[in-house]
Each structure stands twice: as C-alpha cells, then as structure tokens.
Amino acid sequence: MDLSWDSYRTFLTVLQEGSLSAAARELGLTQPTVGRHVDAMEATLGYPLFVRSPHGLLPTDAALALKPYADTLAATSAALLREASSQRDTVSGAVRISASEVIGIEVLPPILAELHAAYPALTIELSASDTVEDLLRQEADIAVRMVAPAQDALIARHVGAVPISFHAHRRYIERRGMPETLADLARHSLIGYDRETSAIRAIIARSPELPSVPFAFKADSNLAQLAAIRAGFGIGICQNGLAARDPDIVPVLPGLFEMKLETWLVMHENLKTAPRCRVTFDALAKGLRDYIRGIAPAVAGSHDPAQAAQAIV
C-alpha cells in the first residue's frame, strides 16, 4: 500500500470535522478533492472508512482503529515542522507549550510576552487545555503539569506548589456575609464542578473536613468557575495568586482550608539541546516560580537579551 501523507491528513480532518465540506474548509481544499482523498484511501485499504448519515459522515470501526496512528503522524509532522523552522545555533522557530486552561490563559501570557521580547524570532504555540498532551508522541514540546511525570524519557523540573483556597467577590460577601466556619458554607452559594473526575475525587479524599454542600453553579471549566467568582455569583476555589491580583476578590475561611497543586515543567529529553526549547523551558520555570512566590512579571521588553542568552551557553 502506498498512501501519501495528504491522504492521512484528510482522513483525520474528516474524522474530526464529521463532513467533507467542513474538512475542506479546514484544510483549504475543495470538497471534491477531499472526497477523492477519502475514496483513494478506502480503495487502497479495501474497506469503507465512513458511512453517510443525516448527521454527516460517521466513522466505521476500522476508521476509529486507524485514528491513533493518524494522530501520531499529525503530531510527528507538526514536530518536524517546528524543528525545521529553527536554526541550529540561534533561538528561533516554533515551540509548542501545553498547559491547563487557567495556567495557559491567566498565568503564562506575561511570561511568554517577556520571552518573545527577548527572542523575537521565537514563535509560541500555546495549547491551553485541561487535556494532557503526550510529550512522547511530540504533541507538544514543553508541558506545565500538576502531576509528576512517570515516563523516563522526559526531563521534569519541579517549580513549586500553587496554593488554592476559597474566594469570593467583595460584592457577594457584602450581600451574603462572610462565613466563619466550614459548616457555614451550607448557607452560601457555592461554585464547583459539574462532573466528578478522578482528580476531584482525590481532592475530596484529602479534604474530609469539607462539608457536602450542593453547588449553586456547576461548570467543568475552571475558567468558567473563576469567571463566576469574579462576577460575584458565590464562593469558589481558585488559585491564590490569581485572586491576589484583584483587590475585590477576597479570601474566604483563610487558614481553615487550603490545598497545593504541585507544579512541574516537563520536556522530552531529545529537545534539551534545542536552543528554542531550552530558553523557553528556563523562562517558564522562572516565571512560574515568580508567580507562585507572588512576584509580578516583568514588563515585556525590559528583559536583557544579552543576559538571557547565557541560558543557552
């Protein structure tokens, strides 16, 4: 069988988008071209990959079995392009960073702005998602994780523990009053999760003192929960460092409940000699440590490129 990468890329995009027309828009191709790619792949393999339905194209079991391999091809192709975009002895090219929604959107931008000001030839690709991307499959170059990595082929640096605790907007406290005990939370509007994941079950197991109180606002997105706190909806859990940025977000029951999210910076060992990855890894490590310690990030452009260049020597 001789199938080009274009066929696999088209197959994966149709699988993700659910129709030929949507895949064509995503790939910048015509719908007939996408259809020919799928037809050619089916003819070569000797079995159908999709069946038509009122809701679009549905993948067959055979197509679903091929998906992990197509995902790996896509990740490898993207990693190849990132490596090819850089010059061997200079800090240039693309670096893909994986982080949770909250870290990626609320914490990393000023760190990355300072990094880019020092190295304008560096392109940052940020994947802000609570889905853990696989560094071994090169889905990302560097990841910020709240769990220690287990794979031997990864370089990991522990950057500290992010404290999280109850907070509320000042407007809510003025309206409903400040609880004095954990039991008082039963009289308040609480902000929390919609579905109980394994991570949440672990938090509950480590915090038996928390009362079982129904949530008035449920969301699986930590960003949505943070937005509800800022809007004055009720009391929720958020990172202390984020709450400290807004004088109207006040701690609730300080000292009675606090947890720490151990934070790791992770990179594949094969990338440790790549200048673009090394300076990014070091900048993220410093920036995250400063965030945990409550140190405000520097203004982008104030960084000394000469001093930063020592990181790759």
Image (tube, grey):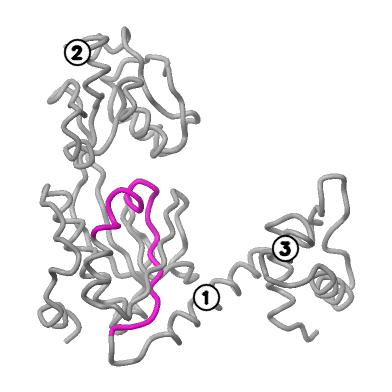
Query: Along the polypeptide, which appears first: circle 2 or circle 3?
Result: 3
Which callout, 2 or 1, points at the residue further toward the start of the chain? 1
For disc 2, the neighbor class at 10 Å (few under 14, some 14 to 19, many from 20) is some
Residue that appears at 21% across and 63% down: 285
The quadrant the N terminus occupies is bottom right
Residue corresponding to mark 3 = 23
Amino acid type shown at disc 1: Ala
Residue 172 colored in magenta in the image: no
Question: From mark 2 to mark 1, how far is it between C-alphas?
Answer: 51 Å
* Quarter-of-image position of residue 163: top left
The amino acid on which the numbered mark 2 sits, given as a three-letter code, is Met
Q: What x and y, as percent, mark residue 8?
A: 71, 74
Q: Is residue 268 left or right of residue 31?
A: left
Mark 1 secondary-structure assignment = helix
x and y percentages locating residue 127 in the rendered image: 44, 59
Residue type, label 3? Ala
| Front position in the image: 135 or 148 | 135
Residue visible at 89% across and 75% down in the picture:
43
In front: label 3 or label 1: 3
Residue at the disc numbered 2: 178
- Image position of 129 (left or right of 289): right
Disc 3: CA contacts within 10 A as few (<14), some (14-19) or many (>=20)? many
Left or right side of 101 for 48: right
Mark sitting on residue 180:
none
- Quarter of the C terminus within the rendering: bottom left
Q: Circle 1 sits on which residue?
A: 78
- Write down the region rendered in magenta: 91-110
